[in-house]
Amino acid sequence: MKQIHNIRTVFCLIAVAAFIFNGCALIFQGTSKNMSFDAGPGSAEVWVNGAKVGVTPCKVELKRNQEYSIEFKKEGYQTKSYRITNGVGAGWVVLDILGGLIPVIIDAATGAWYGFDQDNVNAVLEKQQ
């Protein structure tokens, strides 16, 4: 019986240590996000920061601590450009401060407490004249 009590205590301590030594944002949302891209008409090329990443519709994993320049290109249509910006989530900062200095350092260093200004990008391409 005493051995079971010791095992429970060890598991509880490990769980508490894992929570304390990780930032809240890192635990709940990670350092990247799958962003959805689509365009009308379909099958437009998606370019992120000057590199082709796929054809619509598609999902691309983007790091939360960066901003991105997005372009949709299709032959016979005008290129459409977007900017995806990010910002620090105040809620994550408050939770980290309540958790102590270590979660603040972890979330700041990993960029996990950043969030994008949008969840997906949908473009409507216009025909060239």
Image (cartoon, rainbow, N blue to C red):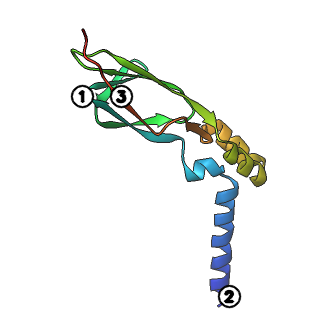
Q: Nearer the viewer, residue 120 or 62?
A: 120
Kind of residue indicated by mark 3: Ala
| Side of 94 where 30 appears, left or right | left
> Please, what secondary structure does the residue beneath circle 3 have?
strand
The x and y percentages for residue 69 are 46, 22
Q: Give the mark nearer the N terminus: 1 vs 3.
A: 1
What x and y, as percent, mark residue 59?
35, 38
Residue contact at pointers 3 and 2, CB within 8 angstroms: no
Residue at the spot of label 3: 123
Neighbourhood count class around disc 2 (C-alpha, 10 Å): few under 14, some 14–19, many 20 upward: few
Q: Residue 41 has which mark? A: 1
CA separation in Å, label 3 and label 2: 63 Å
Labels in figure, total: 3
Tell me which numbered mark, 1 or 2, is placed earlier along the sequence: 2
Position above or below: 5 against 128:
below
Binning the other alpha carbons within 10 Å of mark 1 as few (below 14), some (14 to 19) or many (20 upward) gives some
User: Which residue is disc 2 drawn over?
Assistant: 2
The amino acid type of the residue labelled 1 equals Pro
Q: Nearer the viewer, residue 76 or 51?
A: 76
Check disc 2 and give the amino acid type: Lys
Q: Secondary structure at mark 2?
A: helix
Return the x and y of residue 67 as percentages of the image width and height. Answer: 53, 26
Q: Nearer the viewer, mark 3 or mark 2?
A: 3
Name the residue located 25 percent from the left edge and 11 percent from the top edge.
Answer: 128
Percent from the top left, x then y, of residue 85? 55, 28
Looking at the rendered image, the quarter that the C terminus falls into is: top left
Residue at screen point 67% across, 38% down: 108
Q: Helix, strand, or loop for circle 1?
A: loop
| Front one among 126 and 72 | 126
Residue 18 in the image: above or below residue 12: above
Q: Quadrant of residue 8?
A: bottom right
Q: Earlier in the sequence, mark 3 or mark 2?
A: 2
